[in-house]
Image: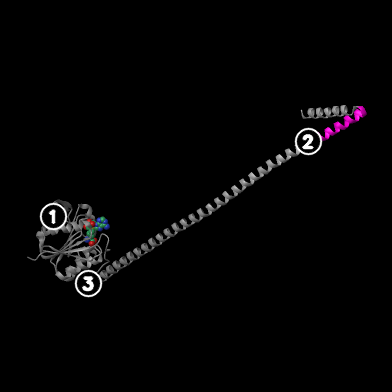
Amino acid sequence: MRLVGLIAVVLAAAVLGGLAGWRADWAASAIAAAGFAVLIVGLWWVRARLNAVRKHQRTMLRLIESMQRQQKAVASSVAAADRAHRVETKHAYRSVSKAVESRTNTLAKQIEQTAEAEADRSRRQADRMFRQLEALQNLYHLIQVRHEMPPSRGWALSPDVLLSYVQEILDRHPRTVLECGSGASTIWAAYAVDKLGAGRVVALEHDQQFADQTRAMLDDHGLSEIAEVRLAPIAPVEVPAGTWQWYDTAALKDLHDVEVVLIDGPPKPTHEQARYPAVPVLRDILAPGAVLLLDDADRPDEQAILRRWQSEWPELTWTKLAHEKGTARLVVPTA
Ligand SMILES: C[S@@+](CC[C@H](N)C(=O)[O-])C[C@H]1O[C@@H](n2cnc3c(N)ncnc32)[C@H](O)[C@@H]1O
């Protein structure tokens, strides 16, 4: 369309040029007019192209400016994000290092407390062991044994209570010592009576195997004439608190004026407060001023037993011996 318009303009210019100068030389005038028109149109076209280029240039400039603005915005948000990240990292680092520091302090305190508790426990254990060794040394000083002695502690009496037991026998010269629960204690008691040259030990044992074992030990030590193990199976017994399970009382029939009693059985599973019947059952065969030693007196069961005895027999006095398993020493009133 543009080309058609251009040709129309050039032809119109040529016709007008020719009409204006037809008399002289109309052809030359037409060519000149057409050339002029071409020039004008060319100039107009160039101007139009220039305008288009300028417009394009302006559009491009606006585009570049917009891109620069966007770039700046992106750069500033990247910087802001970077700043925020740094702050966040700093905060995170601070809070993590604070948490690590506080956990480390707590752990250090716990380790210190555990170490102190452990050191305390070891000291107490060493003290206990030392006391047991002292008691053993005293025992072997008081008693000249003739054969290997059975182990103490655990199920057997500990050296501290064995020493009190032996010392009690040596001090009181009893005619009869009665044990509830045989074992190592029977051997030590028999040695003490043997040293005194008079008296006897009767040990109640509910279990055939342990009865045989203790008898064999008495034989080994040459003490069978002094100590006797009586098999007394567990049987029901009537006591002030009701019906209990205890040693068969038939084993006590010939006993009277018992002056020293060791209460170390029957075992705990026999009955709740298994050793409770000892005092109400033996009460009538105890000599005035007799001494009873109750082992394991620190256990809740034995504490309850002691409370029962006190309420049933308030005149029976008792003191606590500072032994590793706790021993209660009870004294029968003399009148
Ligand atoms: C505390 S023990 C008596 C210990 C004894 N007075 C002594 O000094 O060796 C009470 C009863 O437990 C039983 N007994 C002893 N040693 C035992 C063991 N190692 N395991 C299970 N029962 C045991 C026996 O029947 C014993 O009469």
Estimate the spatial distance between the alpha carbons at disc 1 and disc 3, rounded to whole Å.
33 Å
Check the image and report above or below for 271 versus 319: above
Q: Quadrant of ligand 1?
A: bottom left
Estimate the spatial distance between the alpha carbons at disc 2 and disc 3, rounded to whole Å.
142 Å
The single residue placed furthest to the left in the displayed view is 335
- Label 1: element kind: helix
Q: Which residues are magenta?
A: 23-41
Q: Are marks 1 and 3 in contact (CB under 8 Å)?
A: no
Q: Residue at the spot x=13%, y=59% of the render?
A: 310
Amino acid residing under circle 1: Thr
Query: In the rendered image, which residue does mark 3 sit on?
Result: 142
Q: Nearest the camera: 148 or 143? A: 143
Estimate the spatial distance between the alpha carbons at disc 2 and disc 1, rounded to whole Å.
144 Å
Task: Find residue 294 and report its horizontal and vertical position in percent.
Answer: 19, 61
Callout in the foreground (2, 3): 2
Q: Quick check: 200 left or right of 102?
A: left
User: Going from the N terminus, do you reach mark 2 or mark 1 first?
Assistant: 2
Q: Residue at the spot x=42%, y=59% of the render?
A: 102
Q: Quadrant of the N terminus?
A: top right
Query: In the rendered image, which residue does mark 1 sit on?
Result: 249
